[in-house]
Image (cartoon, rainbow, N blue to C red):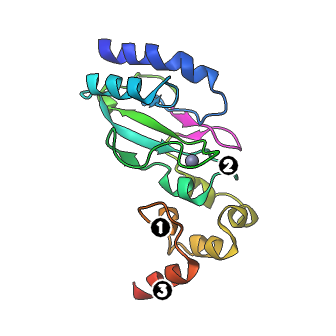
């Protein structure tokens, strides 16, 4: 537990200063709260027995792009996968996942959204499903909004592995092939 305590001592004061960032659950530590990625990678390597990877965390509001929304909740090994910021104006963070056996009991498991705190396990996709149709269409566009509500295309399938948005016609072909 000594190591974990040190990690929280390093990260939490910085996190408190970044109000606009997504909130973190009990097991999460903000990578972007650190002063540099290098410092982070070094800290990560010293704590591999308690850290399990990094989770992409996008802001749960209407300004998040499809690319970042689709990545929300995905877990990548330290130093692998897409980097932040994903684009100009990107507000995402890569958050370290702490092994549950090192979790601090009694801390709240929540993350921020534009309509107040939600369960930390909420992803952008599961959150968007609960928003009004007009809001979904604002974020995704009318056609993608329709596909999203049909349940045939999960949010992360609107974008390919390179972060390119897949054209609607291709999406429709993919659905037909299934
Ligand atoms: Zn982003």
Identify the mark at residue 173; answer none if there is no mark: 3
From the image, which quarter does the N terminus lie in? top left
Res. 9 image quadrant: top left
Secondary structure beneath label 3: helix
Task: Indicate yes or no whether the magenta region holds residue 145.
Answer: no
- Residue at left 70%, top 53%? 62
Tell whether circle 3 marks a residue whose Cβ is less than 8 angstroms from ligand 1.
Answer: no
Say which residue label 1 marks: 157
- Residue at left 63%, top 26%? 18
In the picture, measured across the screen, residue 150 lies left or right of residue 39, that is right
Residue 91 picture location, percent across and down: 60, 41
The segment highlighted magenta reads 109-119
Secondary structure beneath label 2: loop
Camera sees residue 29: yes
Residue 135 picture location, percent across and down: 73, 61
The foreground one among 76 and 128 is 76
Answer above or below: position of 97 versus 155.
Answer: above
Residue 153 picture location, percent across and down: 50, 72
Compute the Cα span from label 3 to label 2.
30 Å
Task: Indicate yes or no whether the magenta region holds residue 115.
Answer: yes
């Amino acid at each position: 537990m000594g190591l974990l305590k040190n990690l929280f001592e390093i990260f939490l004061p910085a996190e408190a200063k970044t109000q606009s960032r997504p909130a973190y659950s009990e097991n999460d530590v903000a990578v972007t709260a650190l002063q540099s990625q290098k410092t982070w990678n070094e800290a990560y390597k010293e704590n591999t027995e308690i850290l399990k990877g990094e989770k992409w965390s996008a802001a749960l509001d209407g300004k998040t792009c499809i690319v970042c929304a689709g990545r929300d909740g995905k877990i990548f090994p330290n130093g692998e996968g897409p980097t932040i910021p994903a684009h100009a104006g990107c507000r995402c963070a890569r958050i370290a996942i702490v092994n549950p056996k090192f979790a601090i009991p009694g801390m709240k498991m929540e993350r921020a959204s534009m309509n107040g705190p939600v369960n930390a396990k909420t992803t952008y996709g599961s959150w968007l499903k609960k928003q009004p149709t007009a809001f979904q269409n604002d974020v995704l566009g009318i056609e993608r909004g329709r596909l999203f509500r049909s349940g045939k295309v999960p949010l992360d399938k609107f974008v390919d592995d390179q972060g390119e948005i897949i054209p609607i016609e291709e999406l429709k072909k993919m659905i037909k092939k299934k």
